[in-house]
């Protein structure tokens, strides 16, 4: 069985970690192979994960002719497959369908789903954030996706409601489940800039371009306050980039805000990133999967985010009080850091217990998906 994985890629480390989680969940079934499009990342990345490469056939059929004359042994050696070889679709987009995202993404995926359904391929959307769908085009695109998908998992209660309201006739196939990367364990790493006295600060450029002007302007001063208050609590601030390509331009901006430089961690391996995020005393993050990594590793985390998915993640880990806003009173961050320091042992133990409960729910996701794909 060959399953195509959509919505993942190497440019975003959270998206790449979703692929890692899928591979880990299906590793016990040697008959399943995973395929991705070239958009996933460069050849060496696909090969490193043992992924097949889906070759897109152009409308004029030129690539079809070229592909057909390649010896089967050559195609097999380089892991090349076409859509005709694909048996089913697993989507792990994270957050791609809703008013805040480009509607073209949802429209293109909807067209793919219609085509796949006609080909008899089962389609499962793994846990992800959805909505809202107040914009007509976004709502209509999601309706088409829901009509043609076999099973859809929403990652939080708001997303569940947004999806059901947008596609009420498909409500029976829309379920609630936590993010699957919770079950991915990061290695225990010794990082020279990270210790039990470190506070990792994880910025997100989306806080500048997907928030309102007031929040966007307040974000860099907010990060500067984080550095200031971390130092006041005798912790060592370190910037960690969870999306090196996108967030790197925030580094100099933060340094300008604080009139000094602090260590910066750049790591391209998503599993190592998770290990690093499970090592400090505290994480303050605006990247969703950085928060998942910390919380699932028992590390208390303070979140500020641009969508509903952040609040719900903290609710899942039973620490909703650790969500804040860039426009909160200036001393709010100091209060939260102080609270984490005071309650650190209790909070860490509670996070570990919660993770075990969430892992059980993730196991159910794969059991339900297995029924759809018959594995």
Image (cartoon, grey):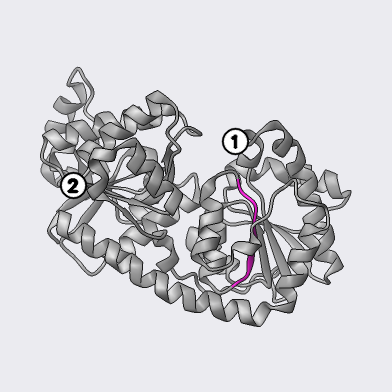
Q: Relative to 213, does residue 232 appear above or below in the rendering? A: below
Q: Which mark is residue 225?
A: none
**Residue 176 on image: x %, y %:** 35, 56
Quarter of the image where the N terminus is located: bottom left
Quarter of the image where the C terminus is located: bottom left
**Seen in the image, is 74 located left or right of residue 354?**
left
Task: Report the Cα–Cα distance between label 1 and label 2.
Answer: 33 Å
Badge 1 crowding class, 10 Å Cα cut-off, few under 14, some 14 to 19, many 20 or more, is some
Numbered disc 2: secondary structure: strand
69 falls in the magenta region: no
The residue lying at 76 percent from left, 44 percent from top is: 220
The residue lying at 78 percent from left, 67 percent from top is: 236
Nearest to the observer: residue 143 or residue 165: 165
Residue on which disc 1 sits? 210
Residue 262 visible? The answer is no
Nearest to the observer: residue 218 or residue 76: 218
**Seen in the image, is 236 located left or right of residue 10?**
right
Q: Earlier in the sequence, mark 1 or mark 2?
A: 2
**Seen in the image, is 77 located left or right of residue 280?**
left
Badge 2 crowding class, 10 Å Cα cut-off, few under 14, some 14 to 19, many 20 or more, is many
Numbered disc 1: secondary structure: loop
**Residue 63 on image: x %, y %:** 21, 26
**Residue 29 on image: x %, y %:** 19, 66
Q: Nearer the viewer, mark 1 or mark 2?
A: 1
Magenta residue span:
299-305
The residue lying at 58 percent from left, 42 percent from top is: 245
Residue on which disc 2 sits? 88
């Amino acid at each position: 069985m060959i399953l195509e994985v959509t919505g993942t890629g190497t440019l975003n480390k959270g998206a790449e970690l979703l692929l890692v989680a899928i591979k880990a969940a299906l590793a016990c079934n040697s008959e399943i192979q995973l395929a991705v499009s070239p958009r996933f990342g460069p050849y060496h990345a696909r090969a490193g994960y043992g992924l097949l490469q889906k070759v897109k056939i152009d409308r004029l059929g030129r690539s079809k002719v070229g592909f057909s004359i390649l010896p089967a042994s050559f195609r097999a050696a380089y892991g090349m497959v076409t859509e005709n070889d694909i048996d089913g679709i697993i989507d792990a987009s994270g957050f791609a369908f809703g008013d805040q995202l480009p509607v073209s993404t949802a429209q293109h995926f909807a067209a793919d789903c219609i085509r796949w359904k006609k080909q008899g391929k089962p389609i499962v959307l793994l846990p992800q954030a959805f909505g809202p769908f107040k914009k007509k085009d976004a709502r209509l695109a999601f309706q088409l996706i829901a009509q043609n998908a076999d099973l859809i998992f929403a990652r939080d209660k708001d997303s569940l409601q947004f999806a059901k309201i947008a596609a009420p006739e498909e409500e029976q196939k829309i379920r609630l489940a936590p993010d699957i990367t919770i079950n991915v364990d990061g290695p225990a790493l010794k990082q020279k800039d990270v210790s039990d006295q470190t506070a990792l600060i994880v910025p997100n450029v989306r806080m500048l371009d997907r928030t309102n002007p007031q929040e966007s302007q307040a974000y860099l001063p907010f990060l500067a306050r984080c550095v200031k208050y971390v130092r006041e609590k005798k912790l060592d601030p370190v910037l960690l980039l969870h999306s090196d390509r996108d967030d790197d331009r925030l580094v100099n901006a933060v340094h300008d805000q604080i009139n000094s430089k602090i260590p910066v961690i750049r790591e391209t391996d998503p599993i190592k990133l998770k290990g690093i995020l499970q090592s400090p005393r505290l994480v303050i993050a605006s990247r969703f999967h950085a928060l998942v990594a910390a919380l699932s590793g028992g590390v208390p985390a303070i979140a500020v985010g641009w969508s509903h998915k952040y609040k719900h993640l903290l609710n899942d880990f039973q620490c909703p009080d650790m969500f804040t806003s860039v426009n909160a009173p200036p001393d709010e961050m100091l209060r939260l850091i102080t609270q984490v320091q005071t309650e650190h042992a209790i909070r860490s133990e509670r996070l570990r217990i919660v993770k075990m409960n969430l892992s059980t729910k993730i196991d159910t996701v794969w059991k339900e998906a297995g029924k759809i794909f018959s594995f």
